Image (spheres, rainbow, N blue to C red):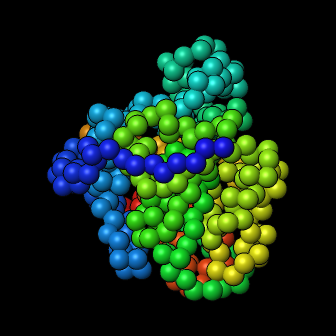
Amino acid sequence: MENRTLRHGPDLRRSADLRDWARLPSWTAAVEPVLAPLAGAADSFTGLTGVPVHLPTALFLRARLMGHTPPGRTSAGGSCHLLATADGWAAVNLARPDDTAALPALLALLGASGEDLHALRTAARSRTAAEVAESAQLLGIAAAGLGHAHGSRPPVHARLLGERRVRTLADVRVVDLSALWAGPLCARLLGLAGARVLKVESTTRPDGARLGNPAFYRWLHDGHDSRVVDFATDALAEAVDGADVVIEASRPRALRRLGIHAERFLAARPGRVWVGITGYGRDDDRIAFGDDAAVAGGLTGRDTHGDPVFLGDALADPVTGVYAAEAVARSLAAGGGELLDVSMAACAAALARTRR
């Protein structure tokens, strides 16, 4: 088991430089028309905690550190692809080596042959967006039809499952079981508001973001304690037991197999909050990453021909992180006791609806 406190390097302390960069129109101009709902959530978080949220930095810092250019029909990070289909568009995210290895199987499900992206683009044109997305999801590949989650579900669905007790963030211990971007950004904002944050990772499955840009990882987890434990032992339950707020991004059944139950956590002590971040809600097992979740919510840009292009860098991830942090702050101010079911696709859809 490893315990340490993460600190970022001096290169990220020059916040003015980041803000000057983030104002560059190549990234912000396309996103600005849809930001009103997110700005409202950020302002609410500031009103509840006194901590300002600089949205351009939250949304585009990773792109700047990675040297990304604004995306087209391939995402800024290069793994997610918008495919023209018989009835619209679908996004297929080949985010992991196993996803790329599964391309021949995906093409077979679509009634085609081949093993590369070109073959997939060709096959998608004769299938509906739903068929492409559903076939990919059957193989565990994150995928979505454009706007297929563009419904009325709120970004955060709160269920009262425990007793209330009002407390301030300065009195709160946050245990962050999440990975990548959305959950850690939520934890970062709560930490800036005074909460003590402990990041807990599995010895066998560490946060995949560690393989990305080190400076961005340090920025997300600056000042947080870090613990690596064997999830097959009692160490995970012990870490969760000491929390007032838990942030996770797992399928509910996966944690239940480890003996971790959100409902029991909330019932055990007044004022606790549980944050579950998933692609489409806790009752939906489909996986999602930031780019395909944004497409599912209809959160895309348009090229000069009016066809969709990706918007921002895995945009549903940081958007979800801000929504989740605001929901936690609001819940704690009301006394907690809530399970906050946060859907990445619904967070993206909330922004996309501003263009209706």
Q: Position of residue 106 (x, y in %)?
A: 66, 25
> Residue placed farthest to the top in the image?
114
Residue toward you, 93 or 18: 18
> How many marks do you count on the picture?
0
Q: Quadrant of residue 156?
A: bottom right
Residue at the (26%, 51%) spot, across then down: 13
Q: Quadrant of residue 202?
A: top right
Q: Quadrant of residue 62?
A: top left
In this image, 330 relative to 160: left or right? Answer: left
In this image, 158 relative to 194: left or right? Answer: right
Residue at the (30%, 53%) spot, across then down: 57
Residue 112 seen in the current view: no
Residue at the (22%, 44%) spot, across then down: 26
Picture layout, residue 78 above or below residue 20: above
In this image, 319 relative to 31: left or right? Answer: right
Task: Specify the quadrant that holds the C terminus.
Answer: bottom left
Residue toward you, 125 or 343: 343
Q: Position of residue 231 (x, y in %)?
A: 74, 46
Picture layout, residue 181 above or below residue 100: below
Residue toward you, 233 or 112: 233
Task: Specify the quadrant that holds the N terminus.
Answer: top right
Q: Position of residue 298 (x, y in %)?
A: 46, 52
Residue 2 seen in the current view: yes
Residue at the (40%, 37%) spot, across then down: 214
Q: Position of residue 225 (x, y in %)?
A: 52, 54
